[in-house]
């Protein structure tokens, strides 16, 4: 008898009709002869509604109270979903994150799972119950409720699948799986059948929003195979698994798996910095200290003992970044700071490029032919990212998607 | 330094503006030199909204899941209220019922508090924190969240006040205190300054909805003095305390403290039952078994070895009661069952009537003079209730209120 972890996102439980659809789906899985553990997010806009309420009260709420507030969303989901499953005649029990034995560190609003004690879940499974667990939440060492950050329900699902040694981990949402690029933007986008963890990580980190990065990291670490699929149809989705498994099962891996784009970035350039040792460490140490994540960094060649440094940061951190960079710039006696918020990052991702050095050149050539200007380039072993003007995004993504042959079945 | 328990009802925290008003009020109490423990209900219509959602899923939800669902309402309140207090610069910590050490029995949706372990609250008080506790909820022996039934937040407040040996227990709502009758119905209704536990119990059990009966029982048992007052003004409210204390402080107690009415009843009459021994026990034992509370019972004299039995039950139980009574009636070969849902119960309540036997006669005389027909009468030591036609309620209440001199200050 197989053990399946099924995770349903907020849009899958947005209203009572959808909750009933989800309940049917879970029961079908049980009737197929599986033991089933379900992880569920807060219904639809609940989390946003709660955040709006908090924001009306204070712009700076204590993190502990924020977690107390946000944890209610998933509790509503587990209770309603369990009622629906019970009403359809199957044995079911709901559990909050703390009740399910999920323990996290003491960092509120973005805690990390430290340990899962699966005894209570196992006991309920052995009683033939479907177990419905609240995603996104855990108990910290003080006995307080804590939350795992946005997308934390994916993490709950993967961590439970790892701890329970589940036979599969199915992550349901309102999309069919992982696509070669955003199907809302490029009509030709094609669903990917298999993608390896590292590619998925690069895609999640470059704008694809189907899966949360940390959950993919945990899946990779513990070898949990994820099936990303739709709540509302029976189509096969995308399997996220190890590179080895994909290589073993298929003759060749594709050169490129997907194209992502991300408009959530702004670019800062500090002009005419003195070329002193440890300059980058000094600047980015200061920025890291105030909790700002930097993405692409590029440093110009030295001209007259002066250099320029450019980097991109998240749009939502723009004001705070600007303040800190202005301060650093005046301390270091740089000439000026320029901020460009009309940029976008497009990335080409594929494990195939490890053994195929021509991909970068091919990408630049495709963009050049379309008249797209590249401002900054950054590469990893399996990804090439370019910062371009945000107005060129659609043109660039379509050209790359076609140029790398992603529209055809590989 | 006094310890004050302050309880705020759902209408007091219905929106973020009201939550801020409540936060200010709590901080003022703290700044007056008190230690403060706050108990709070779910915001406004939250509980009803949650019930509506559950009802869309199933008409028969598992009680455990219902409690999981309903407990979220108070968690939202404690989180938002704590944020508001924190934003105004006072130290505060929120606690769910389970976190506050409130343990109940295993009966879901109407659990009884078994034990309170106040260590965690005391520790936070000693750290100079305002402690904000979720009302209405507790932990049961299985480690599940359970709820204390409607109005359960009052119970939480009084039980905490008793356990913590609080110097006062203030119950805030959108009304100024306890009135001689419903001020929305009778313009002349007057706020009562002092009322004893037993009178309050009779009033709560007869239609006055300001305080939950069980909380008054607990207050009486542990000698907790309750101050029922408004969230939105500084007026002195009503003190609910012991008869002894009222007698000690005042020369005389009033004959009558209040008039209540309750339209939430239906009357059943089983006609021509055989006069067999244990008849009433048989009927009401069966009704009690399916969880239906019976209020007034009246049995006719025996005529031709046949008797009639009438009783009233809550309107919401009407269908279930009817089914069971029809069954019993046919088993016992009674002639028929009549159900009247156009009735109301009016009650006259006062400890003064213990030593004054003329009250009942006075009540009947007042009603008679107004042309109000009395269908059933039931009395206790400090209460006389009459079942009348519901269309006569307003006329009856006004006449009794005036007739017993309640409009004037006593």
Image: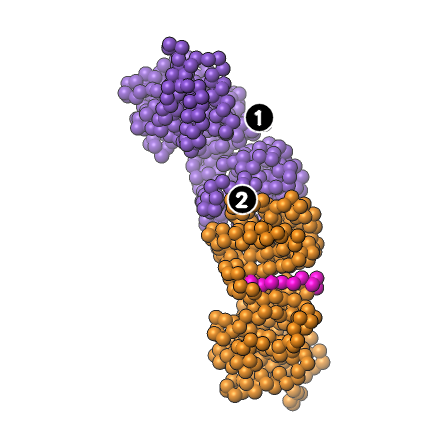
Chain colours: A orange, B purple
In-image side of B2 versus B202 (left or right): right
Spot occupied by residue A88 in the image (x, y as percentages of width and height):
52, 46
Mark 2 and mark 1 in contact? Answer it, CB < 8 Å.
Answer: no
Give me the residue at 55% from left, 29% from top. Answer: B219
Magenta region: A221-229
B147 w.r.t. B89: above or below: above
In the rendered image, which residue does mark 2 sit on?
A: A89
In the rendered image, which residue does mark 1 sit on?
A: B221
Q: Secondary structure at mark 2?
A: loop
In-image side of A226 versus A388 (left or right): right
Give me the residue at 43% from left, 29% from top. Answer: B323
Subunit of mark 2?
A
Q: Secondary structure at mark 1?
A: helix
Which residue is nearer to you in this view: B355 or A385? A385
Give me the residue at 45% from left, 21% from top. Answer: B331
Which residue ends up furthest to the front in the rendered image?
Answer: A32
B389 w.r.t. B75: above or below: above
A218 w.r.t. A403: above or below: above
A228 w.r.t. B203: above or below: below
Which residue is nearer to you in this view: A252 or A279? A252
Q: Could you tell me which quadrant the C terminus of chain A lies in?
A: bottom right
| Mark 1 crowdedness (10 Å alpha carbons): few <14, some 14-19, many ≥20 | few
Residue A226 in the magenta stretch? The answer is yes
| Mark 2 crowdedness (10 Å alpha carbons): few <14, some 14-19, many ≥20 | few
In-image side of B132 versus B326 (left or right): right
Tag 2 and tag 1 share a subunit: no
């Amino acid at each position: 008898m197989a053990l399946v972890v099924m995770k349903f996102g907020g849009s899958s439980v947005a209203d009572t009709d959808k909750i009933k659809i989800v309940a049917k789906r879970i029961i079908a899985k049980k009737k197929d002869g599986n033991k089933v553990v379900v992880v569920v997010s807060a219904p639809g806009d609940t989390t946003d509604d709660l955040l709006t309420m908090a924001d009306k009260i204070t712009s700076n709420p204590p993190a502990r109270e924020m977690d107390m507030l946000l944890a209610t969303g998933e509790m509503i989901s587990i209770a309603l979903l369990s009622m629906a499953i019970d009403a359809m005649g199957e044995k079911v029990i709901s559990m909050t994150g703390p009740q399910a034995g999920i323990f996290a560190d003491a960092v509120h609003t973005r805690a990390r799972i430290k340990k899962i004690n699966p005894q209570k879940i196992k006991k309920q499974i052995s009683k033939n119950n479907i177990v419905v667990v609240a995603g996104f939440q855990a108990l910290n060492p003080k006995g307080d409720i804590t939350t795992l950050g946005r997308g934390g329900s994916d993490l709950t699902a993967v961590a439970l699948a790892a701890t329970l040694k589940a036979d599969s981990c199915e992550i349901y949402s309102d999309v069919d799986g992982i696509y070669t690029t955003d199907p809302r933007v490029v009509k030709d986008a094609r669903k990917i059948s298999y993608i390896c963890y590292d590619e998925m990580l690069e895609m999640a980190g470059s704008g694809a929003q189907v899966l949360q990065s940390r959950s993919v990291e945990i899946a990779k670490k513990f070898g949990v195979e994820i099936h990303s699929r739709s709540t509302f149809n029976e189509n096969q989705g995308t399997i996220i698994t190890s590179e080895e498994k994909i290589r073993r099962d298929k003759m060749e891996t594709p050169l490129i798996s997907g194209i992502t784009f991300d408009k959530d970035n702004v670019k800062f350039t500090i002009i005419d910095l003195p070329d002193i040792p440890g300059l980058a460490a000094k600047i980015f140490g200061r920025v890291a200290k105030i909790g700002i994540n930097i993405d692409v960094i590029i440093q110009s060649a030295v001209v007259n003992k002066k250099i320029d440094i450019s980097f991109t940061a998240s749009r939502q951190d723009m004001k705070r970044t600007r303040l800190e960079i202005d301060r650093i710039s005046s301390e270091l006696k740089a000439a000026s700071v320029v901020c460009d918020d009309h940029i976008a990052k497009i990335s080409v991702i594929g494990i195939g490029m490890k053994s195929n050095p021509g991909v970068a050149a091919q990408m630049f050539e495709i963009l050049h032919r379309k008249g797209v200007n590249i401002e900054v380039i950054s590469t990893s072993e399996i990804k090439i990212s370019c910062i371009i003007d945000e107005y060129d995004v659609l043109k660039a993504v379509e050209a790359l998607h076609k140029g790398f042959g992603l529209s055809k079945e590989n």
